[in-house]
Amino acid sequence: MDLTLLLQGIVSGILASGLYALVSVGLALAIGVIGIVNFAHGEFFMVGAFITYQLFISFGFDPVISLFFVAPTLFLLGGAIYQSSIRYVLKAPELNQMLLTFGISIILQNLALLIWGGDPRTISSVAYRSIGYQLGGVSIGLVPLASFLISLVIVGSLYYALLKTPAGRAMRAVAQNRMGASLIGLEVNRVYLVTFALSALLAGLGGVMIAVIQSPTPIVGFAFTLKAFAIVVLAGLGNIRGILWASLVVALSESLVATLVPNGDALRNAVFFAIIFVVLIARSRRLA
Amino acid sequence: MSTALKVEGLAASYGKIQVFWNISFHVDEGEFVTIIGANGAGKTTVLKTISGLIPLRGGSVQAFGKSLKGFSAAKIVRAGLGHVPEGRQLFGLMTVLENIESGADYLPEARKEAAKTKDFVYKLFPRLAEREPQLAGTLSGGELQMLAIGRALMSKPRLLLVDEPSLGLAPALTKTVFGALQQINKEGVTVVLVEQNVQQSLKLADRAFVLENGEIIKEASGAKLLHDPDVQAAYLSI
């Protein structure tokens, strides 16, 4: 086996895991705190990517600057979607919730198709897009590296906020015991609203990064929804702490399959399905 | 003496199942009131309706002269009502300290005095101070009950609703919990206690009600009800 190729696979996997964690942690929040399985999560990611693209094309905004525009926009979009639809199905059967979020996903995808068309949109003229470093034969792109570090900072800040701030404790309280949360003076519906909006914001920030790493299309979010589900399932539904290592497992597996297996690039998208499959079977055997 | 709680024509239901239609009573400020009754009489539902956990289907609830109509459970806590519910409803994956602090975190007035209230809670239940860094989910039944009362006290309630605090506790712990409730009442907090341990709870009560099939059928001082032949026959096996 070519050691350099193996190292390249490992490094690429580690770098991708940051973005995966950023997107998955938002989904885990929605599932853990609100109890909603949000199939539209990846579409927030896609909207973040297209806003970044549009800001670059229309105003020449650097994607790093776009982070500060996308964050409030996606927070408001998430809040508006929660207020106009999600909150009405919170007590409905899970199937109804899933169908609703799936419908929202289709609407957002088609709106993007209407506005930006189906072709990949590239932010090609960003100077740092092509910068890379060589380290013992392993190449590290500046954009994936920066995306990894920014994602880690955001996810780390989120962990800190969840553990140490009253707002974070409010989310944990609602996730653990809704009745108990009401009895300490928390308006549970308001916590849900903020959590859903925050979940959209986190996905949107991931979208800013993917706008530079790849060339987004209206369906880019769907693949990330599936990856995020694989990560959330691996970490354990609603387990925010497990997201980091689960992201690492999924991203590394994908990267190693793509690098080491012949025609592996075509197989990489099967990896997260295999992970969901194995984890669900293993968990159900443990329960049986 | 002014009125802490005034309940008139209270009605509540779980879906289509009506639990009670017309319950009325009042509690004066500083009183210790006990509600006794058999399983399924509606005691827990009365407390849950007052604290907004179950929507009011009819009638009215006033606390300290203010109507609670349309108030959410969270807003009712801000109006000065603390509730120690059946099953305790604590945050099992948070530490004892986090559970305690959470009781005051979201109430601006209570937060100002949080350190002082926490000292009072720890004086009342020194065991909680020893268990501060421990996850609430790992506590014993008695400790959980102490924590539930402590968390409710952190909201600086003027009226405390307490549901079955002795459930599943050993006699020594029951004594500790009832002693603490008596102490809380002496500090000026009005207490409404729902309890199946009729003997102990009536001993504490200034006044007590007997609830049967969703209706208050008797009301008297705790001492008087303790010697009431019907109460003795139905609840004290005498």
Image (cartoon, coloured by chain):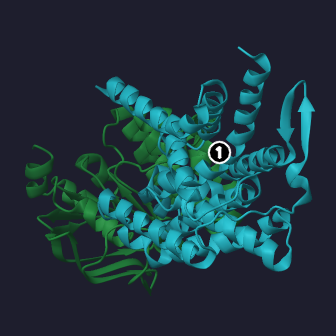
Chain colours: A cyan, B green
Which residue matches tag 1? A21
Residue B213, position as x, y percentages in the image: 11, 64
Say which amino acid is labelled 1. Ala
Query: Which residue occupies 27% across, 67% down?
Result: B46
Examine the image and state in which quarter residue A69 appears: bottom right
Front residue of A51/B45: it is A51
Give percent across and percent down for residue A218: 57, 65
Q: Secondary structure at mark 1?
A: helix
Quadrant where the C terminus of chain B is found in the figure: top left
| Residue A77 drawn at (x, y percent) | 59, 74
Chain name for mark 1: A
Tell me what residue is drawn at x 43 percent, y 37 percent: B142
Q: Nearer the viewer, residue B205 or A148?
A: A148
Q: Is residue B109 at least partly visible in the picture?
A: no
Is B113 on the left or on the right of B47, as rendered? right
Residue at 48 percent of width and 69 percent of height = A189
Q: Nearer the viewer, residue A284 or B207?
A: A284
